[in-house]
Image (spheres, grey):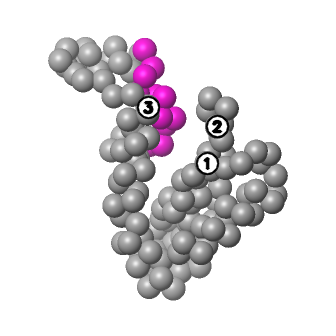
């Protein structure tokens, strides 16, 4: 829940200071790798995909798409998020795509991912 709420880098769970802090709270704590965190996030997204599609299709919100790209171990990833203001005037955001992106991170490759994302919806 912490990672989903505060959005630290996934490697946060492997920081020495964070691990020491958790161990001080519970010496029997089982540590999880950033790879396992990533796998859990992707699995949760897949489980909620149909709900997200229905919500997006049934809404009449104006929205904005944003994309963040980063590279880890020579592999580049893109995360596409849609932002909107709900009926209660609260800003909402939902990740709608997380995938590998080809290099270079030029307009064509970003455009290709965004088009596939829109078709997904």
User: Given this view, does label 3 or label 1 mark the residue nearer the observer?
Assistant: 1
Q: Position of residue 66 (x, y in %)?
A: 64, 59
Horizontally, is 70 left or right of 34 in the view?
right
Q: Secondary structure at mark 2?
A: strand
Horizontal and vertical percent position of residue 112: 72, 63
Residue drawn at x 42%, y 50% is: 42
State whether residue 69 is above or below residue 9: below
The residue carrying mark 1 is 100
- For label 3, the residue is 34
In this view, the mark in front (2 or 3) = 2
Residue 112 shows up from this direction: yes
State the image coordinates of residue 52 (x, y, percent, origin top left): 42, 70
The quadrant the N terminus occupies is: top left
With 111 as the anchor, is 4 left or right in this view?
Answer: left
The magenta segment is 6-16
- Determine whether the residue tagged by mark 1 lies in a helix, strand or loop: strand
CA distance for labels 2 and 3: 15 Å
């Amino acid at each position: 829940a912490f990672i989903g709420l505060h959005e630290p880098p996934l490697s946060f769970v492997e920081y020495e200071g964070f691990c020491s802090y958790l161990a001080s709270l519970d010496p029997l704590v089982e540590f999880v790798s950033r790879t396992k965190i990533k796998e859990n996030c992707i699995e949760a997204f897949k489980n909620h995909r149909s709900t997200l599609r229905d919500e997006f299709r049934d809404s009449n919100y104006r929205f904005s798409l944003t994309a963040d790209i980063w590279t880890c171990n020579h592999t580049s990833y893109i995360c596409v998020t849609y932002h909107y203001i709900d009926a209660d005037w609260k800003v909402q955001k939902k990740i709608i795509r997380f995938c590998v992106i080809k290099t270079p991170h030029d307009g064509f490759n970003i455009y290709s991912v965004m088009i596939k994302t829109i078709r997904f919806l």
